[in-house]
Image: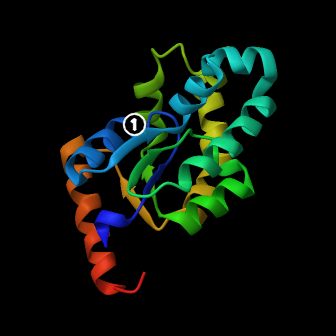
Amino acid sequence: MLENNNLFLVGPMGSGKTTIGRQLARRLKKSFLDSDHEIEEHTGASISLIFDIEGESGFRVREVSIIDELTQQQGIVLSTGGGVILAAENRAHLKERGTVIYLHASLRKLFYRTSRDKSRPLLQTDNPREKLREIVEERDPLYRETADLIVETENRTVHQVVNYIIRQVKKNNNENPNC
């Protein structure tokens, strides 16, 4: 069952979706996709440039389209952008087409992981820590509502998180063999 099931990673920026997703895909011998990277490939423009030209709303329209496309594939591990859960269509596609895994970390850890990264358009403000707090506060309930599994990444290595996810998904599949 695990071989045919899609795994979709959600969580705020800095939660480790891309890093963990790559390792998870490698271990499970699945294809790894990153929705932000796919948007950049389709448009030929960086996420930052899309935000500059079209604003967040323009980016979100593109994101809904790419999530619909990507979640229809089989046997993938998909790392999503932090705001993917803002659109009801995205939440529905993720829930219906795979196992949704919420990678959770404290605000302190998220800020530490993102503080030097200038490629995150939403954090290019006078107070990036406060902006990140607002983002997490708004989105956390949606991540939790959408997730099949919540994984704390705070004090775990990538290897530990990947092993934990694999164990939990296998356990879930054994308990629900018809899913």
Name the residue rendered at 61%, 48% in the picture.
69
Give the answer, above or below, for where 24 lies relative to 114: below
Residue 13 spot, x, y in % from top left? 51, 35
> Dividing the image into 4 quarters, which one contains the C terminus?
bottom left
Tag 1: amino acid:
Thr
Name the residue rendered at 35%, 45% in the picture.
31
In the picture provided, is 129 more to the left or to the right than 21?
right
Q: Which residue is mark 1?
A: 18
> Dividing the image into 4 quarters, which one contains the N terminus?
bottom left
In the picture provided, is 127 more to the left or to the right than 113?
right
Element under disc 1: helix
Name the residue rendered at 42%, 59% in the picture.
6
In the picture provided, is 144 more to the left or to the right than 167?
right
Colour pattern = rainbow
Question: Front-most of 27 and 139?
Answer: 27
Name the residue rendered at 39%, 65% in the picture.
5
Give the answer, above or below, for where 128 lies relative to 82: above
Question: Front-most of 173 and 160?
Answer: 173
Question: Around disc 1, counting alpha carbons within 10 Å, would you say few (fewer than 14), some (14 to 19), or many (20 or more)?
Answer: many
